[in-house]
Image (spheres, rainbow, N blue to C red):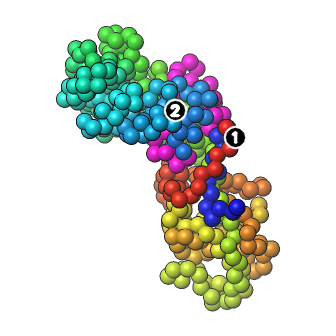
Amino acid sequence: MTDRALARIDLSAVQRNCAELKRRLEGAELCAVVKADGYGHGAAWCARAAIAGGAGWLAVATAEEAADLRRHGIRERLLVMGALTAEDVEIALAADADIVAWRTGFVGLAARKAEAADTRARLHVKLDTGMGRLGAKDLEEALEVVAVTGESERLEIAGVMTHLATADEPDSDFFDEQLRRFRPFVERVKEAHPGSIAHATNSAGLFRSREAHFDMARCGIAVYGLDPFHEDPALRGLEPALRLESYVADVKRMQAGDTVGYGRKWTADGERDVAVLPIGYGDGYRRGLSNKADVIIGGRRYPLAGTISMDNVTVDLGPRSDVRPADAATLIGGDGDERILAEELARILGTINYEVTCGISPRVRRLYHGE
């Protein structure tokens, strides 16, 4: 059966990417970030592949994401990185997941919820070294959170953490400044809690500096073979795991002056063939790519023609083409000598590769192979 829109996920690529990341960590732990349904790739499937590649931890953004991984039989250590409500804390503890704290009030909530569940909560205290989002902004404030946590029998200081704002900007000195701010926090907490771990870096920081590795790296985008510096993943030994496909539903013969799509944004300058693919922005193939991106059919690139609609795109095949209905079309991935990277689409859209894959909608079927 031909799918109107299909995302093929190569799990062996995820496994190899994680093995490469683990190799570069030189003994530090690898935490594979599988939030947002594995950046659009499928959280549970990719979690298993990441574990096979050497990941000892998995990270998510929400308590429900942690619970879903447990429902799929994932048993590795889980870290819920996002802000949690009282109900979220209950869900996270029921999933035996570690949680993040940066306020003493939250520490008290976690202790009460752990007491009610007759369990012990593992907390990672977060210092905001410059991201300006979650985390205690002041070192002494973060140390107070650690101290309050250590007073409860129901709580454990499992780790300390921060998040890097400019790791993917090689010319930014702020990367080093954040590490400088983080180190005293690590040293003081480890002195009092020697079993705790320290973690700061994302995918970009892993490649950028060994100084950012600490005890663990939280890698997201690189796990899926996407480049954290928004270039070619192959430059860092990474393999894109996702391929987005459709097919040619029809080929239409256009005459000079004929137009295509909403708003008539493309006009034939002579006799031309136009292919119609049954995929569109309802599938996450963004409308902003209209008249700017290419697709690959039969190993050859062809430009989009006209406005991308919710369920269809149109493609300029040129004055005369041998493309026929039912031919396969590649929107992300390779075919023959041609390839279209998520990074290429991101540049056209003025965004990042993360958003390209996260935006592929649930109505696109995922087909997994290479496990």
Q: x, y percentage for residue 242?
A: 62, 49
Quick one: which residue is furthest to the right in this view?
A: 322
Disc 2 or 1, which lies upstream in sequence?
Answer: 2
Q: In this view, does 143 lie to the left or right of 177?
A: left
Count of numbered badges drawn on the protein: 2
Q: Which residue is drawn at 46% across and 21% down?
A: 214
Residue 11 horizontal side relative to residue 181, left or right = right
Using the rendered view, name the quadrant where residue 257 is placed.
bottom right
Q: Name the residue under label 1.
A: 370
Q: Which of 91 and 342 is in front in this view?
A: 91
Q: What residue type is labelled 2?
A: Gly
Quarter of the rendering occupied by the C terminus: top right
Circle nearer the viewer, 2 or 1: 2
Q: What residue would you read off at disc 2?
A: 73
Q: Is residue 128 shown left or right of residue 232?
A: left
Q: How far apart are marks 2 and 1 (CA)?
A: 20 Å
Q: Is mark 1 on a helix, strand or loop?
A: loop
Q: What element carries label 2?
A: loop
For the stretch drawn in magenta, the main secondary structure is helix
Using a 10 Å C-alpha cutoff, classify the residue at mark 2 as few (fewer than 14 neighbours), some (14 to 19) or many (20 or more): few
Residue range highlighted in magenta: 14-41
Position in image of residue 224 (x %, y %)? 58, 41
Residue 370 position within the rendered picture, expressed as x and y whole percent measured from the top left: 69, 40
- Choose between 351 and 81: the one closer to the eye: 81
The N terminus lies in quadrant = bottom right
Q: Residue at x 71, y 78 (%)?
A: 251
Question: Where residue 176 sits in the image (x, y, percent)?
Answer: 42, 29
Report the residue at 59% width, 81% height from top: 260
Asked if the magenta segment contains residue 37, the reply would be yes
Give the vertical position of 297 relative to 151 (above or below).
Answer: below
Please indicate, yes or no, whether residue 287 appears anywhere in the rendered image: yes
